[in-house]
Amino acid sequence: MGRYLLRRLGLTLITLVLVSFAVFAAAEVLPGDVGRTILGPYASQQQVDQLNHQLGTDEPLVKRYVTWAGNFVRGDWGESPIQRVPVRPLVLERLKNSLILGAFALILIVPFSVALGVFSALNYGKALDRIISISGLSFVALPEFVVGVVVIVVFAVQLGWFPTTSQVPSADPVDIVRQCLLPCIPVMFVLFGYISRMARAGTIEALRSNYTRTAVLKGLPQRQVILRHVLRNSLLPTITVVSVQVGYLVGGLVVVETLFNYPGIGQLILTAATGHDLPVLEASVLMIALIYTASNLVADVVSALLNPRVRLAT
Amino acid sequence: MSALDESGLAADTAAAQVDVRRVRRQRRAELFSAAIHSKTFLVGMAILLFWIFSALTWRWVVTNPQAVDPGATLASPSGDHWFGTDNLGRDVFARVIAGAAPVLTVAPLATLLGLFGGITIGLVTGFYRGWIDDIFSRIVDALLAFPLIIMAVLVLASLGRSPRNVILVIGIIFTPLIARTVRSTVLVEREREYVAAARLRGERGPRIMVVEILPNITAPILVEGTIRLGYAIFAATTLAFLGLGIQDPSPDWGLQIANGRAYLQVAWWMVLFPAAALATLVIGVNLVADGLRRAVEE
């Protein structure tokens, strides 16, 4: 187990280094002239060159990457040349706001989707199973802004139960629901589709297995067969899917936060990308890659802990 | 080898080829009939065909989607304007029907681009394996560590916003994803006897890939293509909504919803009708994909 963990950790670090380089290269190479973007089309070439020199953007790419990565690891994330504020507090603040939204969505939707997926599998082939499968299939396909505007029009504008734009909630549970529920519904639709489908497929496979047949034949009550034999095996792949969906969730948040004008990291990435705010863009995208790889790592470790076939293998 | 043997071999090969064609035709017919008997497939197809029809014929069916009626801005749905008018007094019904055209241009082209790249890479990596395959797998893993929409935002913000760039970005992001699916089917096919036979006949790698393997994996490619088309519609309209894709005054649905956002309190019809249109289209495509997938699996 220890060796497994160590190897997994090493692979995660390598992925992060690769991703950080890709992020840096994509952000720095593509946009063309940073100085020109900041100063606008009417500045003279001399002014542009001078600013580029000040910002260090005229240095070779690899050298700039090493400087940037070194500073990043030491906690110096630089200053946003557009917003004129230090990058680290800004990105971390926005990240915290997004985590509130993401955690709210996951806590609500994961148990619900898993339960419906398992229920669907236990009623395999019946009308209810078909209804759950088809709605999951349709929910996955719906772009977040489509579901988003519909819930805004119905629940915020017509019924007036929720605000049309969301702020960061206070610690009060009522306020959390008030601010977070509407923006979370679109991503919960998509998550429901993926997670329930996976839980259903895993359960169907486990139900058809020999160990389930053995458990039934040796006379265990159905409840015990399902809880101890079926679910323990069927939910393993579901854990992996949930962690992969954390990556999706961040992408979905870009849209939802824009729609609800919520100050999260998705909205920050969009404004940084359109405004060529490179330090902010690089730091936020890297934080997202970090969260994503970390959630994959946690998922692997959790499924290893739950699965003796992985846990005991050296 | 005597002349007699050789002519016998040629006759055998010709007979085998006719046989192969017949088997393929028969399989296609079975697939078609399985699909046609699936309710999911039929419902999805009906929705999809309706929007394709709208995209092709809106010019002759509805009024000009750019025509402005200054006397009736933000008018609610009525006999004159079935879906109401927007903030400039443009007819929302006309714009919803015409809005099928930009989506159904960008998304299929992006899907085709991704299919072309994905099939090529998938065939090569799956057939040759080795170091090409290893490098490719690493790249795909790194790519998947990234929310796709963020990647598209990064690239479009720097390349500039145009329908062409949207097609390019979505197509390029799709390429490794499609390649992965194609590769996994090629891995199975390359172990089949007909591939070994082609090798024995002295056929070269590229010919085996294109002439022997490709025709046998059209069904999974068709399913993958349909699923990707759904994602392409999702991605293209989302990018338009974020202001990174097609620009005004195009009647694109994502753009209409983005514009209508400012008028939510007074004119729900500006967003709800394009939203409903887009929802039916993506669900339709997904139902078609699901119906096809089931038909192929059977």
Image: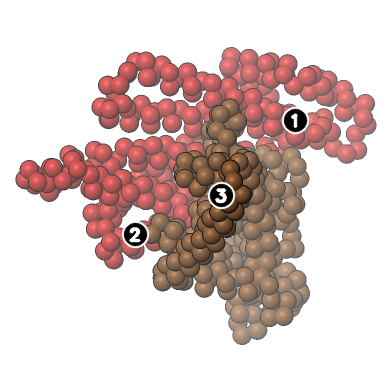
Chain colours: A red, B brown
Give the residue furthest to the bottom. B79
Q: Which residue is mark 1?
A: A29
Give the residue furthest to the left. A219
Q: Which residue is mark 3?
A: B5
**Which amino acid type corresponds to the residue marked 1 in the rendered image?**
Val
Q: Which residue is mark 2?
A: A132
Secondary element type, mark 2: helix
Classify the position of the C terminus of chain A by image quarter: top left
Q: Is residue A93 visible?
A: no
Q: Residue B105, how many percent across, how many down? A: 68, 61
Q: Is residue B261 left or right of residue B217?
A: right
**Which amino acid type corresponds to the residue marked 3 in the rendered image?**
Asp
Circle 2 crowding by C-alpha within 10 Å: few under 14, some 14–19, many from 20 = some
Q: Is residue B152 left or right of residue A135?
A: right
Q: Residue A69, how many percent across, how many down? A: 63, 18
Instruction: For the residues labelled 1 and 2, say whether their Cβ atoms are less than 8 Å apart.
Output: no
Secondary element type, mark 1: helix
Q: Is residue A46 left or right of residue A224?
A: right
